[in-house]
Image (cartoon, rainbow, N blue to C red):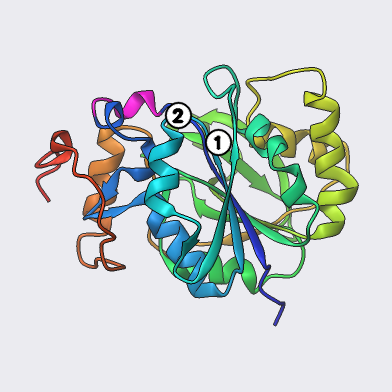
Amino acid sequence: MPDTPSHAIILAAGLGSRLRPLTEARPKPLVEVHGTPILHNALLNLASLGVAETTIVVGYRKDDIMTSCGSSFGGMKVTYVESSEFERTGSAYSLWLARETLLNGDLFLLEGDVFFEYSALARLRDHEGDVAALDVFDEMMTGSAVTLSADGHVREFRMNQSAADLSTDPLFKTINLFRFNIDTLRGHLVPRLDRAFATGGSKAYVEQVLASLIADGELRIKGALCDDLRWFEIDSTADLCVAERIFRSQRPYPVVAMPTNGAAVGLCGV
């Protein structure tokens, strides 16, 4: 079995504007699903898997995240990188800011708005090389997706997909959980980020950078199918209600005390 990466990066700098009014008083990664903040769920899953250190890229309401998560979480060290340009940049820029961590060794890369169960990370750990967690794209999904080659590697990324796109190739939804090995990070991903952002910020997403590397033949990502596992990406209040329905049969972890935002109480009724 492959070793568990010792490091992880969580991208958590964004405004979360589509989750207003919940994000007027807290950053999106601290919005709760059945009492557990999205970010706490991710940190606890990483710590339970044996990750030694996680770097969180923060921006909007950064002090709230740093106070809530601290310097250690579940016995795992937590460090922070600040994005002062979070209102004008995308997730790829946040990742570039954490390039020092990218150069440290194999790691997990997570987006800070995905609520998921532990087994999704364990599945990434058990794969060799670079791997992305995927689900079968269905008619209720929207957003970034991939197509796969016959041997199960990502052939291409497709942005802004919806049910209308299902009539072509079979699509798989990106869960925004990745594992990368150090050779890929040092030899391809960091140099590509350096070239893109050395002259300033950009609205590019991580998926767009990965898509360019795949198109240029510099990256092979294996798809790890997680269609039997529970997860949900929370971008809006409607997404939050879906996540609460998916996870209502189990509260994965003890709630870590934090301030309550009254706007969240009773929103979904589950």
Residue 144, disc: 1
Which residue is painted at 75% across and 61% down in the image?
A: 151
Which x, y percent locates residue 233?
A: 41, 44
Q: Who is closer to the viewer here, 130 or 87?
A: 87
Residue 20 placed where, x, y %? 28, 25
Residue 157 in the image: state x and y as whole percent.
Answer: 66, 37
Please say if 48 is above or below 168: below
User: Which corner quadrant of the image does residue 31 belong to?
Assistant: top left
The magenta segment is 16-21
Mark 2 or mark 1, earlier in chain: 2
| Secondary structure at numbered mark 1 | strand
- Which of 15 and 240 lies nearest the eye of the viewer? 15
Which residue appears at 38% of the width and 60% of the height? 230
Q: How many marks?
A: 2
Q: Which residue is mark 2?
A: 60
Identified by mark 1, the residue type is: Ser
Residue 228 appears in the figure: no
